Amino acid sequence: MVRVVPDVPAIHRRFDYRVPPGWGHDLRVGSRVRIELHGRRVGAWVVEDHVSQLPGVTLKPLAASSGDGPPPAVMAVAEWAAWRWAGPVSSFLGTASPPRVVRDAWSRSPSPAGPSGPGPASPGGGSVELVDGVLAAAAHGGDRGDHGGDDRASVVRLAPSLDATLVVLELIHRVGSEGVLVLVPSWARATQLAARLRRAGVETAVMPDGWAQAAAGRGVTVGTRAAAWAPLSRLRAAVILDAHDEAYVEERAPTWSAVEVVVERARRDGAPAALVSACPPLTLSEGRPLVTTSRSVERRGWPVVEVVDRTGDDPRTGLFSERLARLLHSVLDRPEGRAVCILNRRGRARLLACSHCGALARCTRCGGPMAQDESGGGLRCRRCHDHRPLVCAECDATRLKTLRIGVTRATEELTALTGVTAREVTGSSDPSDSAGLSEARLVVGTEAALHRVTRADAVAFLDIDQHLLAARFGAGEETLALMARAARLVGTRDGGGRLLVQTRLPDHEVLQAAVHGDPTQLGGPERDIRRTLGLPPFGALALLRGPGAPAYAAGLAAIDGIAVSADGDTWLVRADDHRRLCDGLASVPRPVERLRVEVDPADV
Ligand SMILES: [Zn+2]
Ligand SMILES: [Zn+2]
């Protein structure tokens, strides 16, 4: 007898089935089967075996075997994830299962070279000390809110142009390749990393195609977000490159984070986990050991960042400062020179500035962007909803104006300014149309352009305030991450890499952090605001949407330690930590109506 979870998200129950005679030796917890359920044949996973049968109950037999699924350790993490992100366990088991039917993955022979294979040579250099730090941090096991005791993760802060692959190679050199999991944010990075590891003589499985190889414990496992669920029976070590990248978080509910899943797996297996980032956000770094290079090495890993103060300029004179024009000319005068200009063109991102002194209208409480309050006539903060009269905080003038310009106009104007045909790239541009892009010498676009272009001599943010003052609390950290991405395109300061930002907030801590190649300049102020407002990591949040939200929100509001507030058709649920939040979400019965629960929402 076995107990199964059906592959039907709406069904949270488990069911018992009889194992037909003749098959059973390869059936184990995690195996995929097909069952008859309510007259339909559906997929399912075995979650318990050797279940005892209640007397007088006749069980249906399993209908078919569909091969191997996740190992028991991953099954257990899926149960944890179902609690942590308030979603059906079947959605995690689906991600953790092989893309095609795999049989007998667990009995395959390990690598011919032996259990670990010959380790690669140590790449030496600073990577030795960094890995020393990662292993030392894991040996202690910290007590950190979300994962409780035995958190084995450390944050490795590495400037954008420093080579994080050396950390991966050194770690493999130290612990062997078997059971090592490495996550990267994009498919392109996964194939690059795998090629590089193989050149170093390291056997490498790339997920999802390498599922069976990973299950057999052969070599290092590499992949993107879904590889957090790779079928390793036991993690020996994990590395997450660019751990701040939003690609690690699933947008659809359940909104799970690959970083959190890997950290939990490492905790259970007592394995070190290195969260590598040029600009670690507070939700990763708070309470965790920090491993980093010397200040001078870190600083040299950032490009020169030039801040152009536009406060006194009239927005009608154009978007292009003299210094921007000079930079573009100096880059484009060289035959191979290449420049990228970034503009957040979404109409929502309108900012208000004082008509008299040009200062941006910001919240005095949280630093967020102010919008004109439609009902009252004053100003209301788009982040914390604080209210104040319609007066410039700098000069007491009472007239404000809206700043706005689109990518298309900027593209035309830049073509006119430089005499080089500018190429426009936005999130909606056809990604397959990248042939021309690699030749374009001047690219203008939204931040999507930073994902599409691989190299440039200079990147200019035409109006970085649109990013800094986006109406979400993470806007500062996200802007620094954007600058780190741009920094990687242009390379180090010694190699001539240049970033230019046009701003009305020249002293903003994000810009100062980039100028000095020192992300700690952002951490302090950001931490104070988050703590004051009870925002992550000093609180846990969930957003509720859909017709079922009102009833579910009412149930949550009755729980001690949980606060619920409505904002239009969404409900924000707050608690001091994830234990309270997730226990609460699990304890209230789900309404029949559609309900979307987004745990750890970014858009707040
Ligand atoms: Zn003013
Ligand atoms: Zn505010």
Image: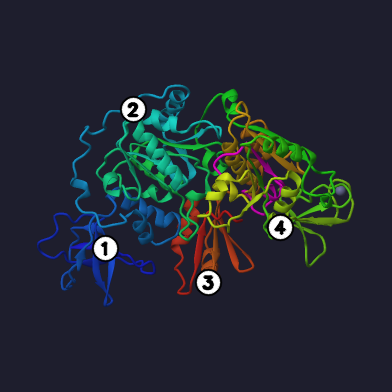
Task: Say which element carries label 4.
Answer: loop
Task: Tell me the residue that label 2 is attached to.
Answer: 120
Compare marks 1 and 3 and give the one earlier in the sequence.
1
Placement of 551 over or under 344, stated as above or below: below
Q: Residues within 10 Å of mark 2 (few under 14, many from 20)?
A: many
Point 71% across, 46% down: residue = 462
- In the image, what residue type sits under mark 2? Pro
Task: Tell me the residue that label 3 is attached to.
Answer: 551
Q: Is residue 464 on the magenta stretch?
A: yes
Task: Say which element carries label 1.
Answer: strand
Task: Tell me the residue that label 4 is attached to.
Answer: 385
Residues in magenta, as a range: 453-474
Compare marks 2 and 4 and give the one earlier in the sequence.
2
Q: Tell me whether the residue at label 2 lies in contact with that at label 4, contact meaning CB atoms closer than 8 angstroms.
A: no
Label 4 CB, ligand 2: below 8 Å?
yes
- The label on residue 4 is 1
Compare marks 3 and 2 and give the one earlier in the sequence.
2
Q: Position of residue 192 (x, y in %)?
A: 42, 40
Q: Tell me whether the residue at label 4 lies in contact with that at label 1, contact meaning CB atoms closer than 8 angstroms.
A: no
